[in-house]
Image: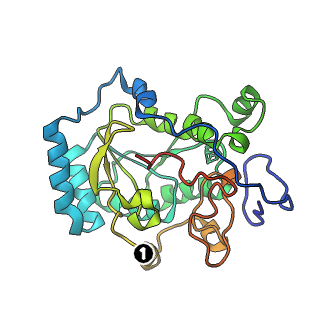
Amino acid sequence: MGLPHASRRSSMPSATAPPLPVLQVRSPEPQAEQLRGALAADPPLEPTEALLAELKQQSEQLESASPQEILQYAVERFAPRFTMATAFGPEGMTLIHMLAEIAPQTPIFNLDTGYQFAETLELRERVKQRYGIEVELKRPETTVEEYEALHGGPVYKTDPNRCCFDRKLRVLHESARGMHAWASAIRRDQSEDRGRAAIVGWDAKFQLVKISPLANWTKKQVWKLITDHDIPYNPLHDKGYPSVGCWPCTRAVQLGEDERAGRWSGFEKKECGLHTA
Ligand code: SF4
């Protein structure tokens, strides 16, 4: 995987290494039952028939609403139990920009796996300077060094589903303790799975209401807002990385490749599991 421009926080494969063969991911996507335990001591919203009907109706009503109107609804309906997770992608940055105007007190967090690019973490500082919003870094229980020592080496090389589960999904589950709703920055046109996202829906995996204000937006609309308002963004996007995740699982894409082609390149995996049903 060639990553000529990016800064990484720990050791990485040689830029001249031959491409990895396409591998099967070893662990299946974790099931909702595996995740539910973390919230047992703090029961979240119950997905009663009445709640599900409310969410469905609200989602339909908001289909033609602007992202700002959707965020406004989310804040009015769920704050202070409304939160947002961000990886500081262009879509996440647009939501942070909107929230800074609508409800800057909204708690926003980042799943800091220990494998993020230095550029991503620097963007967190720029968010603080620009908006006065301190995005909280939520970390797994183990450092990268401890985790790799426990597993006899980097888990992302052999079992990325396990690695994402341990270093992202578990952490999100813990971070959402006490919350009732979370905002995600997914767009429906990013993938088939994301294409099924509701504007407002029940997220059975995390037992939260999931709100996707940008579901109907295109990449072009996102970048227009960024340009029009000089919203800070990850400099890696200017260096061939349309989608930025952890450095071991992100490569630059070639002209004509899908915007997520650089994620888990060499594996069948296309999502970390946060946004799959
Ligand atoms: Fe691990 Fe890669 Fe998932 Fe990051 S994206 S948590 S390094 S498998």
In the rendered image, the vertical position of residue 39 relative to residue 181, given as above or below: above
Q: Residues within 10 Å of mark 1 (few under 14, many from 20)?
A: few
In the rendered image, the vertical position of residue 247 relative to residue 66, given as above or below: above
In the rendered image, the vertical position of residue 181 relative to residue 190, given as above or below: above
Instruction: Name the residue at 47% across, 49% down.
Output: 134
Instruction: Name the residue at 44% across, 55% down.
Output: 132
Q: Where is residue 144? Give x, y as percent.
A: 70, 36
Viewed as shown, does residue 220 lie left or right of 75? right
Q: Is residue 157 visible?
A: yes
As drawn, the residue found furthest toward the top would be 41
Q: Quadrant of residue 218?
A: bottom left
**Residue in the foreground of this view, choosing between 122 and 129:** 122
Instruction: Name the residue at 43% across, 52% down.
Output: 133
> Quadrant location of ligand 1?
top right
Mark 1 residue element? helix
Q: Is residue 185 visible?
A: no
**Residue in the foreground of this view, choosing between 6 and 167:** 167
Q: Where is residue 78? Give x, y as percent.
A: 23, 44
Q: Where is residue 210? Give x, y as percent.
A: 32, 48
In the image, the residue with mark 1 has its CB under 8 Å from the nearest atom of ligand 1? no
In the rendered image, the vertical position of residue 111 relative to residue 129, given as above or below: above
Q: Where is residue 24? Give x, y as percent.
A: 66, 46
Q: Quadrant of residue 123?
A: bottom right
**Residue in the foreground of this view, choosing between 22 and 15:** 22
Q: Say which quadrant the N terminus sits in.
A: bottom right
Q: Which residue is labeled 1 in the image? A: 229
Q: Amino acid at mark 1?
A: His
Instruction: Name the residue at 35% across, 64% down.
Output: 214
